[in-house]
Image (cartoon, rainbow, N blue to C red):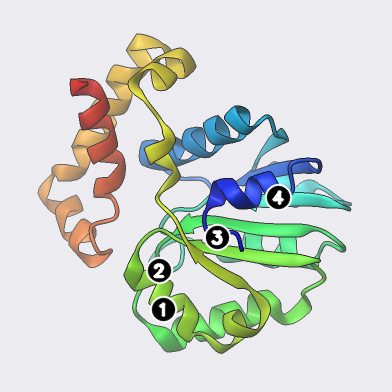
Amino acid sequence: MSNNLSDVFEQYKDKKFIFAKPGGNWGDHLIYFGAEHLAEKLGLNYESKTKAEFLALEEITDAVIYIHGGGAFNSWCSDSGFKLLTVALKKKNNIVIYGPASCGNNESFLNEKFTECFNENNSSACYMFARERNSYLMFTSIPILQNSVQILQDVDTAFHLTKEVITNRVGKKGLTMTFMASEMIMKPVMFRMILASMKWFLIPLFCVLVLNIG
Protein backbone atom coordinates (compact mmCIF):
# COMPACT_ATOMS: atom_id res chain seq x y z
CA MET A 1 0.00 0.00 0.00
CA SER A 2 1.30 3.48 -0.87
CA ASN A 3 1.90 5.61 2.21
CA ASN A 4 3.45 8.83 0.89
CA LEU A 5 3.56 11.06 -2.16
CA SER A 6 6.82 9.56 -3.41
CA ASP A 7 5.26 6.09 -3.39
CA VAL A 8 2.26 7.23 -5.39
CA PHE A 9 4.43 9.11 -7.89
CA GLU A 10 6.58 5.99 -8.31
CA GLN A 11 3.49 3.85 -8.82
CA TYR A 12 2.53 5.85 -11.92
CA LYS A 13 6.04 6.71 -13.09
CA ASP A 14 5.42 5.47 -16.63
CA LYS A 15 2.51 7.86 -17.18
CA LYS A 16 2.53 11.49 -18.23
CA PHE A 17 1.98 13.92 -15.34
CA ILE A 18 0.27 17.30 -15.44
CA PHE A 19 0.99 19.53 -12.45
CA ALA A 20 -1.70 22.15 -11.83
CA LYS A 21 -0.95 25.25 -9.73
CA PRO A 22 -3.93 26.68 -7.82
CA GLY A 23 -2.13 30.03 -7.49
CA GLY A 24 -1.04 31.95 -4.43
CA ASN A 25 1.86 33.69 -2.72
CA TRP A 26 5.59 33.01 -2.34
CA GLY A 27 4.84 30.33 0.25
CA ASP A 28 2.68 28.50 -2.27
CA HIS A 29 5.46 28.69 -4.83
CA LEU A 30 7.79 26.94 -2.38
CA ILE A 31 5.19 24.17 -2.25
CA TYR A 32 5.18 24.01 -6.07
CA PHE A 33 8.99 24.00 -6.23
CA GLY A 34 9.11 21.16 -3.71
CA ALA A 35 6.72 18.92 -5.62
CA GLU A 36 8.49 19.63 -8.91
CA HIS A 37 11.86 18.88 -7.32
CA LEU A 38 10.51 15.56 -6.04
CA ALA A 39 9.16 14.76 -9.52
CA GLU A 40 12.53 15.51 -11.08
CA LYS A 41 14.34 13.35 -8.54
CA LEU A 42 12.04 10.46 -9.43
CA GLY A 43 12.43 11.04 -13.19
CA LEU A 44 8.77 11.82 -13.85
CA ASN A 45 7.63 13.18 -17.20
CA TYR A 46 5.57 16.20 -16.18
CA GLU A 47 4.22 19.46 -17.52
CA SER A 48 3.51 22.37 -15.21
CA LYS A 49 0.34 24.39 -15.76
CA THR A 50 -1.08 27.49 -14.14
CA LYS A 51 -4.70 27.38 -13.08
CA ALA A 52 -5.78 29.19 -16.27
CA GLU A 53 -3.68 26.92 -18.50
CA PHE A 54 -5.05 23.79 -16.86
CA LEU A 55 -8.67 24.92 -17.11
CA ALA A 56 -8.14 25.68 -20.81
CA LEU A 57 -7.09 22.11 -21.62
CA GLU A 58 -9.87 20.50 -23.62
CA GLU A 59 -8.85 16.87 -23.31
CA ILE A 60 -6.67 14.92 -20.89
CA THR A 61 -6.67 11.13 -21.09
CA ASP A 62 -4.62 8.38 -19.45
CA ALA A 63 -2.49 10.84 -17.50
CA VAL A 64 -1.81 11.69 -13.87
CA ILE A 65 -3.27 15.03 -12.85
CA TYR A 66 -1.45 16.35 -9.82
CA ILE A 67 -2.91 19.40 -8.08
CA HIS A 68 -0.46 21.13 -5.79
CA GLY A 69 -1.38 21.11 -2.12
CA GLY A 70 -1.63 24.03 0.26
CA GLY A 71 -4.32 25.55 2.44
CA ALA A 72 -7.14 25.89 -0.10
CA PHE A 73 -9.85 23.83 1.62
CA ASN A 74 -11.57 26.39 3.81
CA SER A 75 -14.31 28.98 3.58
CA TRP A 76 -12.07 32.06 3.42
CA CYS A 77 -9.60 31.17 0.64
CA SER A 78 -10.41 31.31 -3.06
CA ASP A 79 -12.24 28.38 -4.64
CA SER A 80 -9.18 27.44 -6.72
CA GLY A 81 -8.50 24.13 -4.99
CA PHE A 82 -12.10 22.96 -5.22
CA LYS A 83 -12.37 24.21 -8.81
CA LEU A 84 -9.26 22.40 -10.03
CA LEU A 85 -10.30 19.20 -8.28
CA THR A 86 -13.78 19.36 -9.83
CA VAL A 87 -12.41 19.84 -13.36
CA ALA A 88 -9.73 17.17 -12.92
CA LEU A 89 -12.29 14.60 -11.80
CA LYS A 90 -14.49 15.27 -14.83
CA LYS A 91 -11.69 14.28 -17.21
CA LYS A 92 -12.04 10.62 -18.21
CA ASN A 93 -9.62 7.82 -17.32
CA ASN A 94 -7.00 9.79 -15.42
CA ILE A 95 -5.36 9.39 -12.04
CA VAL A 96 -6.06 12.44 -9.85
CA ILE A 97 -3.75 13.31 -6.96
CA TYR A 98 -4.28 16.27 -4.64
CA GLY A 99 -0.98 17.09 -2.95
CA PRO A 100 -0.49 17.51 0.81
CA ALA A 101 -3.09 20.03 1.95
CA SER A 102 -4.78 21.32 5.05
CA CYS A 103 -8.41 22.24 5.59
CA GLY A 104 -10.63 24.20 7.92
CA ASN A 105 -12.77 22.66 10.66
CA ASN A 106 -16.20 23.49 9.20
CA GLU A 107 -17.34 19.96 8.44
CA SER A 108 -20.68 20.91 6.88
CA PHE A 109 -18.96 23.36 4.51
CA LEU A 110 -16.35 20.78 3.49
CA ASN A 111 -18.96 18.06 3.05
CA GLU A 112 -20.98 20.31 0.71
CA LYS A 113 -17.96 21.46 -1.31
CA PHE A 114 -16.41 18.02 -1.74
CA THR A 115 -19.78 16.50 -2.67
CA GLU A 116 -19.98 19.08 -5.46
CA CYS A 117 -16.42 18.23 -6.57
CA PHE A 118 -17.20 14.52 -6.89
CA ASN A 119 -20.59 14.96 -8.53
CA GLU A 120 -19.08 13.90 -11.86
CA ASN A 121 -16.13 11.66 -11.06
CA ASN A 122 -14.66 10.04 -14.19
CA SER A 123 -11.18 9.40 -12.76
CA SER A 124 -9.59 5.97 -12.69
CA ALA A 125 -8.36 6.59 -9.15
CA CYS A 126 -8.08 9.53 -6.78
CA TYR A 127 -5.66 10.25 -3.94
CA MET A 128 -5.84 13.07 -1.43
CA PHE A 129 -3.01 13.91 0.94
CA ALA A 130 -3.34 15.76 4.22
CA ARG A 131 -0.21 17.55 5.41
CA GLU A 132 -1.02 17.15 9.11
CA ARG A 133 -3.10 14.97 11.41
CA ASN A 134 -6.09 17.26 12.00
CA SER A 135 -6.76 17.64 8.28
CA TYR A 136 -6.31 13.90 7.77
CA LEU A 137 -8.98 13.22 10.40
CA MET A 138 -11.27 15.82 8.83
CA PHE A 139 -10.85 14.30 5.35
CA THR A 140 -11.65 10.83 6.69
CA SER A 141 -14.86 12.18 8.27
CA ILE A 142 -16.29 13.40 4.93
CA PRO A 143 -18.55 10.65 3.47
CA ILE A 144 -17.87 11.38 -0.21
CA LEU A 145 -14.10 11.24 0.40
CA GLN A 146 -14.44 7.99 2.35
CA ASN A 147 -16.17 6.41 -0.64
CA SER A 148 -14.22 7.93 -3.53
CA VAL A 149 -10.64 8.65 -2.44
CA GLN A 150 -7.58 7.03 -0.96
CA ILE A 151 -6.80 9.42 1.89
CA LEU A 152 -3.17 9.61 2.95
CA GLN A 153 -0.90 11.85 4.99
CA ASP A 154 2.50 13.25 4.05
CA VAL A 155 4.64 16.32 4.70
CA ASP A 156 4.16 19.64 2.93
CA THR A 157 6.11 19.39 -0.33
CA ALA A 158 8.13 22.50 0.59
CA PHE A 159 10.08 20.19 2.89
CA HIS A 160 11.55 18.43 -0.16
CA LEU A 161 13.59 21.57 -0.86
CA THR A 162 17.11 22.45 0.16
CA LYS A 163 18.85 25.80 0.08
CA GLU A 164 20.83 24.64 -2.97
CA VAL A 165 17.69 23.59 -4.84
CA ILE A 166 16.03 26.97 -4.29
CA THR A 167 19.20 28.86 -5.23
CA ASN A 168 19.51 26.86 -8.46
CA ARG A 169 15.87 27.53 -9.24
CA VAL A 170 15.58 31.25 -8.53
CA GLY A 171 19.16 32.43 -7.96
CA LYS A 172 20.61 34.09 -4.85
CA LYS A 173 18.55 37.24 -5.36
CA GLY A 174 15.39 35.17 -5.65
CA LEU A 175 16.29 33.29 -2.48
CA THR A 176 16.58 36.59 -0.60
CA MET A 177 13.24 37.76 -1.99
CA THR A 178 11.63 34.49 -0.94
CA PHE A 179 12.99 34.95 2.58
CA MET A 180 11.72 38.53 2.76
CA ALA A 181 8.29 37.63 1.40
CA SER A 182 7.91 34.77 3.86
CA GLU A 183 9.05 37.02 6.71
CA MET A 184 6.16 39.39 5.97
CA ILE A 185 3.65 36.89 7.28
CA MET A 186 4.77 37.70 10.80
CA LYS A 187 3.10 41.14 10.65
CA PRO A 188 0.17 41.46 13.11
CA VAL A 189 -2.69 41.30 10.60
CA MET A 190 -1.28 38.21 8.95
CA PHE A 191 -0.50 36.66 12.32
CA ARG A 192 -4.23 36.48 13.09
CA MET A 193 -4.72 34.70 9.77
CA ILE A 194 -1.98 32.26 10.67
CA LEU A 195 -3.72 31.35 13.91
CA ALA A 196 -7.07 31.02 12.13
CA SER A 197 -5.58 28.59 9.61
CA MET A 198 -3.90 26.38 12.23
CA LYS A 199 -0.55 28.09 11.62
CA TRP A 200 0.06 26.43 8.25
CA PHE A 201 1.34 29.66 6.74
CA LEU A 202 4.33 29.14 9.05
CA ILE A 203 5.54 26.10 7.09
CA PRO A 204 7.08 28.06 4.17
CA LEU A 205 8.59 30.53 6.63
CA PHE A 206 10.10 27.73 8.69
CA CYS A 207 11.51 26.05 5.59
CA VAL A 208 13.14 29.22 4.31
CA LEU A 209 14.53 30.15 7.72
CA VAL A 210 16.12 26.73 8.13
CA LEU A 211 17.46 26.71 4.58
CA ASN A 212 18.79 30.25 4.89
CA ILE A 213 20.64 29.40 8.10
CA GLY A 214 21.85 25.99 6.89
Q: Nearer the viewer, mark 1 or mark 4?
A: 4
**Location of residue 214 in the rendering, given as x and y in whole percent from the top left corner:** 22, 21
Query: Can the viewer see residue 160 in this picture?
Result: yes
Q: In the figure, is residue 104 to the left or right of 186?
A: right
Helix, strand or loop for disc 3: helix
Q: Closer to us: mark 2 or mark 1?
A: 1
Q: Is residue 5 above or below residue 184?
A: below
Nearest the viewer among 185 and 96 is: 96
Query: Around disc 1, counting alpha carbons within 10 Å, would you say few (fewer than 14), some (14 to 19), or many (20 or more)?
Result: some
Q: From the viewer's perspective, is the residue at label 2 or at label 4 nearer? A: 4
The residue tagged 1 is 138
Q: CA distance from mark 3 to mark 4?
A: 24 Å
The kind of secondary structure element at disc 2 is loop
The kind of residue on which mark 1 rests is Met
Residue at the limit of the structure toward the front, as seen here? 1
Give the residue pinned by disc 4: 11
Of all residues shown, which one is farthest toward the left?
188
Residue name at image x 25 percent, y 39 percent: 205
- Looking at the picture, how far across and down is residue 142, in whole percent? 51, 85
Distance from Cα at disc 1 to Cα at disc 4: 26 Å
Looking at numbered disc 2 in the image, what kind of residue is underneath it?
Answer: Cys
Picture disc at residue 81: 3
Give the CA separation, mark 2 to mark 4: 26 Å
Q: Amino acid at mark 4?
A: Gln
